[in-house]
Image: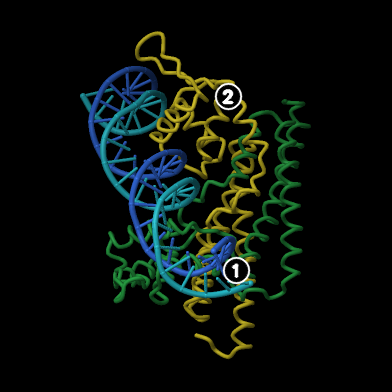
Chain colours: A yellow, B green, C cyan, D blue
Amino acid sequence: MTIRSALLQLLDEGERHGYQLKVDFEARTGGIWPLNVGQVYTTLDRLQRDGLVVATDPPDEASQRRYTITDDGRAEVKRWLAASAVDTNPPRDELIMKVLLAIGRGHDEAIALIDEQRSALLAALQLGRRRQRAEPDGGGPSKRLARDAVLTRVEADLTWLDRCEDLIRTETKANGRTS
Amino acid sequence: MTIRSALLQLLDEGERHGYQLKVDFEARTGGIWPLNVGQVYTTLDRLQRDGLVVATDPPDEASQRRYTITDDGRAEVKRWLAASAVDTNPPRDELIMKVLLAIGRGHDEAIALIDEQRSALLAALQLGRRRQRAEPDGGGPSKRLARDAVLTRVEADLTWLDRCEDLIRTETKANGRTS
DNA sequence: ACGGACATGTAATTCGTTACATGATTTC
DNA sequence: GAAATCATGTAACGAATTACATGTCCGT
């Protein structure tokens, strides 16, 4: 439901046509979440079906169709923004899942996986930081904050990976080799 | 595809029946990701369709059906575990999306949203930490690491929220009130 | 005249998810 | 004997995603 809510929020800022929603969405999220145009239209269909959005046919042919938010839509946006993102079950994260499951394959394999994931994360971190330095204020605050968000997550994942490795190593020592 | 890969990985550790997959999955992920049993069976159907898993009918009636991984399945697990989780586009995160989009509603509203999300995160953080202290080693390393993962993420989100607020405040001062 | 960005959509697929129905076995 | 857990599934829906088909407009 995140795309749906996001597009609705954009429409709450002002009516737009489909393609513009794609462009605005990607701009606002700093390009970290590419969005297939087709999905915009399918999502708009569902929003219309649910009465949160109405489409205005263009007066002259070959002009763009404009989508406008309804009062119900505005209420929904308000609800969505006010809701705490932490209350919903945490999303299934690929990295966490891989590490947790790899433990079942034995400690050695788990540590190998952690090491590989860590170097990939480190590479991504360096690349991201370099990019942030390269364009000190490129694309306004949204773009900067969006990239900051991923970098912060990557840093958190790295410290978590360290903790995983530590815990596994102390466990291996305690129990004798388990793998 | 994360559930699918996760169940396949569990089957790579040894054959199981459906319900056991649900139990094992939740145990391995420390209960942070509840899994509807029905989804196990639908996912198993798709895994069979793709030839990654075969089902062995029970010899006597009223015994459980056992699912076994195939060679193709094993290869797929290996591929999945080896793939870097950072290469795929970052998943659409609700918190990040809300903050980034709220900026479009003006700086005041954005800061209000950030404050609310922050207090929710802080509450979750305190609760989580208390729980970690309550059971120092409950449920083995997987459970501990799973909970650690969410806590680390929450901490990261908190520092990111601070950075967001800082950047918005300095922007407001620079441009004069924008909202 | 051509390519690329702009613009709108449809069809099909996959995955995740929920709700529901059904029954066996265990435990109190 | 009743409740909880174990166990297997089906039906249906929603959302995300991709691939495809079309066409306009603009710059070079």
Q: Residues within 10 Å of mark 2 (few under 14, many from 20)?
A: few
Q: Which mark is residue A111?
A: none
**Is the residue A18 above or below the residue A144 in the image?**
above
Q: Which residue is mark 2?
A: A72
Give the image location of residue D27, x and y in percent.
39, 23
Residue sitting at x 54%, y 65%:
B26
Q: Residues within 10 Å of mark 1 (few under 14, many from 20)?
A: many
What is the three-letter code of the residue carrying label 2? Asp
* Quadrant into which the N terminus of chain B falls: bottom left
Q: Which residue is mark 1?
A: A161
**Residue A50 vs residue C22, the one in the foreground:** C22
Q: Chain of mark 2?
A: A
Disc 1, SS: helix
Q: Chain of mark 1?
A: A
Evaluate whether label 1 is on the same chain as label 2. yes
What is the three-letter code of the residue carrying label 1? Leu
Give the image location of residue D24, x and y in percent.
32, 17
**Is the residue D15 above or below the residue D26 in the image?**
below
In the image, farthest residue toward the top = A59
Residue sitting at x 38%, y 9%:
A60
Sequence-earlier tag: 1 or 2: 2
Disc 2, SS: helix
User: What's the CA distance linking mark 1 and mark 2?
Assistant: 44 Å
Give residue B18's quadrant in the image.
Answer: bottom left
